[in-house]
Image (cartoon, rainbow, N blue to C red):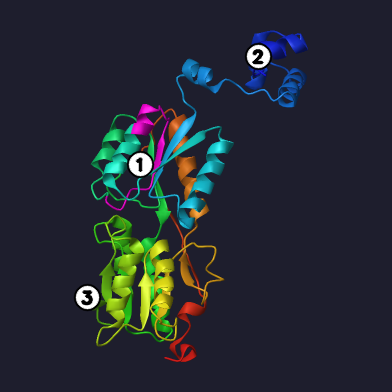
Amino acid sequence: MPNMTLRDIANALDLSVSTVSKALRDSYEIGYETKKRVMNYARANHYLPNRMAKSLKEGKSGSIGVVVCSIDNSFVSRMLDGIDGACTAAGYDIIIMQSKESLTQEKSCLKQLEARGVEGILISPAAETVNLDHIIGLRGVGMPIVLFDRISERFDSYQVGVDNREGAFLATQHLIANGYMRIAMLNIGPDIHFASLRGKGYQDALRANHIPYREEYVRLCNPSSRDTLKDCVRTNIRSLLELSTPPDALFTTTDQLSTHSLSVMHQLGYQVPQDIALIGFSNTELADILTPPLSTVYQPAFEIGRKAAEKLIALIVGKEEPEEYETVMLPVQLDIRESSRTRIEAGQ
């Protein structure tokens, strides 16, 4: 059955096509009763506007591009939920693309989105993206872009993220307060801005408590390396725990590092927190039912996505660029569970 058209509605209600069109656009020229009559009929008969024709006429696609590292990640999924809610409420579709933490693939994603005529782009840069020139260049030719989650001091537009340094400081400080003095960190690389900030927060907490920084306790896993992330986590945890003075606690800086670390420790036969305590950045909804329940630095993922989308939509519909762009820093919170209980309770 062919889709209903504006003319079909007009004929059925004995109105002009122009009147029906204006009523569906909520024009001030059309009275309330007529609008209600047209809307009700359109809804009852499942009328779908020809979005492509509308886009061609108005020069707008009605779509927003979103580039993330991977959708196979609970934290990213929650951010996408927030983005989708804000975009749907504003009448925009979203086109989601994955960089897989690759700079080359990220550049390809941006080119494809530009070619598809998106009205703006939300991007959480890949782990390999140290230089933002390709994003800055696209922004420079007029594409509205907002960075979210992985933000950068070098980017001149709206950005939405969390206080990464503070989150890492709080997590490390929590371990110290619970009696752990030999604290290792598993991170994803010093050249990645958010990872660098989390590394600084870890060091700040050690310094504030007069605990020496030990290079052998800091390990890196590049998520875009040929080795799988879990294999890298396994190699590093085994190496850490085979040191002559092994760490008694581990702080992990990303969602996947946190959950992989807990899994690897079980596989290697170590008990958490009896052999080594664990806390990390993670938004997994399974934290409460893991064995043991995982202590986490929780980030408001849904809010990050929602606010980033709202900022981008404001850029798209705004007639003038703001004099100053705001970087929204949302607070993190510690969710303390069994994996980081005190040394005395853990029996260390």
Q: Residue at x 36, y 52 (%)?
A: 150
**Residue 53: percent from the left, percent from the top?**
52, 17
Q: In which quarter of the image is the C terminus?
A: bottom left
Q: Can you tell which of label 1 and label 3 is closer to the viewer?
A: 3
Label 2 environment density (alpha carbons within 10 Å; few <14, some 14–19, many ≥20): many
Q: Please name the amino acid that badge 2 sits on.
A: Leu
Could you tell me if the residues under marks 2 and 3 are in contact, i.e. CB atoms within 8 Å?
A: no
User: Is 44 rendered above or below residue 205?
Assistant: above
Nearer the observer, 256 or 82: 256
Alpha carbons under labels 2 and 3: distance apart: 69 Å
Instruction: Give the magenta-colored segment's residue range.
Output: 112-128
Alpha carbons under labels 1 and 2: distance apart: 40 Å
Nearer the observer, 55 or 144: 55
Give the labeled residue for mark 2: 6
Give the labeled residue for mark 1: 157
Q: On the image, which quarter does residue 297 sit in?
A: bottom left
Residue 108 is one of the magenta-drawn residues: no
Q: Residue at x 73, y 23 (%)?
A: 45
Q: Please name the amino acid that badge 1 sits on.
A: Ser
Residue 117 is one of the magenta-drawn residues: yes
- Please report whichever mark, 1 or 3, sits nearer to the chain's N-terminal start: 1
- Please report whichever mark, 2 or 3, sits nearer to the chain's N-terminal start: 2
Q: Which residue is drawn at 29% across and 55% down?
A: 224
